[in-house]
Amino acid sequence: MSAHPQLAAAAPSVQEIGRAATLALYDELALSPKPGLVTLTDCGSHVDMDAHTFMRSLLALRGYFVRIAGLGAAGAQFEALERCGIAAEAHMLTATGGINTHRGAIFMIGLLCASAGALAAEDRRLTPQALRDTLVQRWGDALAARAKQPSTLPGGIAARRLGLRSASTEAAMGFPTLFETAVPALHMARARGLSMPCAQLDTLFAVMAVLDDSNLAHRGGLEGLRFAQRAARGFLAAGGAAAPQGQAVARAIADEFVRRRLSPGGAADTLAATCWLARLAG
């Protein structure tokens, strides 16, 4: 069972879908220790943002997640979702003074909210498989075409240069890291009796271990990405958050990430998406 209050298992409203997204962004922010990422008390590897910046951002995005869920419910084409996301990004940048806090989440969780809205409109139960199938069936072709276009964003440029799987490709494939790694990791951790924060921490490291995180690639090159993946695998192999020294090990890894200026933003977005799904579907 999830530690979060459960929303309707079948056909949540677009307001519930959007509210869960905002709360999930807070779930990710509140988790600590996180390697290189902003928490409520730490700026991680960032010098231009802190928890206040993130709070301004996620509050600015509240309406966006509801709107894009509504577009999904209305059967909108990908172009309409994209326009909605672009407007949300502009709103975020206004709220943060030009700092990119949630661009990846706008893309990833926005698409998931649209998919959830589409399921709700058909009065279908929101399950991970139904969500993934809906995303691929409705917008997979458009996302695949988008993935072929050269990116102008730092992470996308790094992914293309290094031959990594981009965020757009992940989306076109139905977010395999989310559904095949993150969601099972959270469920298994909770089934073992871990608290929600410990389960979320293990989930974050499980994602870091396998994801072609373009944020890491941009900041640290291929060497930085591979270091992060090795560190994540080592943390989990040693018992993860449930190990007697699990929290101390996580803090030591976080310190090393800061020293190397690494920040696994893609993994953070995937964790937030996992928290969103947990709030909606358990």
Image: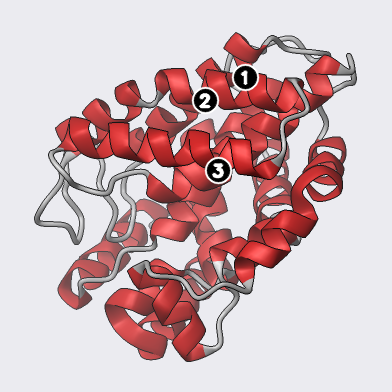
**Nearer to us: label 3 or label 2:** 3
Q: Where residue 70 appears, x then y in whole percent? A: 65, 19
**Horizontal side, residue 219 vs residue 187: left or right:** left
Q: CA distance from mark 3 to mark 2?
A: 13 Å
Q: Earlier in the sequence, mark 2 or mark 1?
A: 1
Q: Please report contact status of discs 2 and 1: CB closer than 8 Å, yes or no.
A: yes
Q: Where residue 22 appears, x then y in whole percent? A: 45, 24
Dot 2 falls on a residue whose secondary structure is helix
Front residue of this view, candidates 175 and 240: 175
Amino acid type of the residue that numbered disc 1 sits on in the rendered structure:
Ile
**Nearer to us: label 3 or label 1:** 3
Q: Circle 3: is it few (<14), some (14-19), or many (20+) Cα within 10 Å?
A: some
At x 61% / y 12%, what residue is drawn? 16
Residue at the spot of label 2: 65
Residue 263 picture quarter: bottom left
**Horizontal side, residue 6 vs residue 52: left or right:** right
Amino acid type of the residue that numbered disc 2 sits on in the rendered structure:
Phe
- Split into 4 quadrants, where in the image is the C terminus? top right
